[in-house]
Image: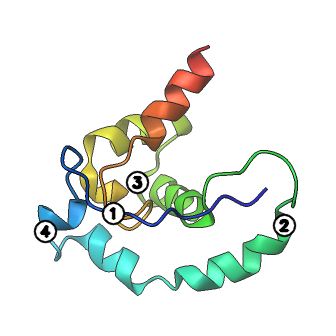
Amino acid sequence: MLGKNPEKKPELFRPMLVDFIDHEHELVLLSEKIDWNYFEKEFSPLYSKVGNPSHPIRFMVGCLLLKHLYNLGDETLEKAWIMNPYMQAGKSGKEISKTAQNHRHETDS
């Protein structure tokens, strides 16, 4: 099932990335130039209409781009994602993401 991009609202204890990142950073600029709607349109038909929701297409495409750009494997991408807010910018929305940490806890069980 296709995951949805949740609409982000400011929260008191979860800072918004756009409030403290450098908007001239290469990853921020790249994420602004990518036509994310193109990927949504192309990949949406490949998802099932039933079952558990997936990660959003934007997140998945963003992770694949980061893996290719920085020659990262799955585990190293996860660690880099947690440590580098610029990798999170544009891939999962505008707030600091816990996606990689949640995924790690799910796979440890």
- The residue that disc 1 covers is 9
Distance between mark 1 and mark 2 Cα atoms:
29 Å
Residue ID at (64%, 77%): 39
- The residue that disc 3 covers is 70
Q: Is residue 37 above or below residue 87?
A: below
Mark 1 surroundings: few (<14), some (14-19) or many (≥20) residues within 10 A: few
Quarter-wise, where is residue 21 in the image?
bottom left
Residue ID at (66%, 58%): 3
**What's the mark number on residue 46?**
2
Say left or right for 23 vs 55: left
Q: Amino acid at mark 2?
A: Leu
Distance between mark 4 and mark 1 Cα atoms:
21 Å
Tell me the element at label 2.
Answer: helix
Q: Position of residue 108 (x, y in %)?
A: 57, 16
Q: Viewer-proximal residue, 88 or 68?
A: 88
Which mark is nearer the camera, 3 or 1? 1
Distance between mark 4 and mark 3 Cα atoms:
19 Å
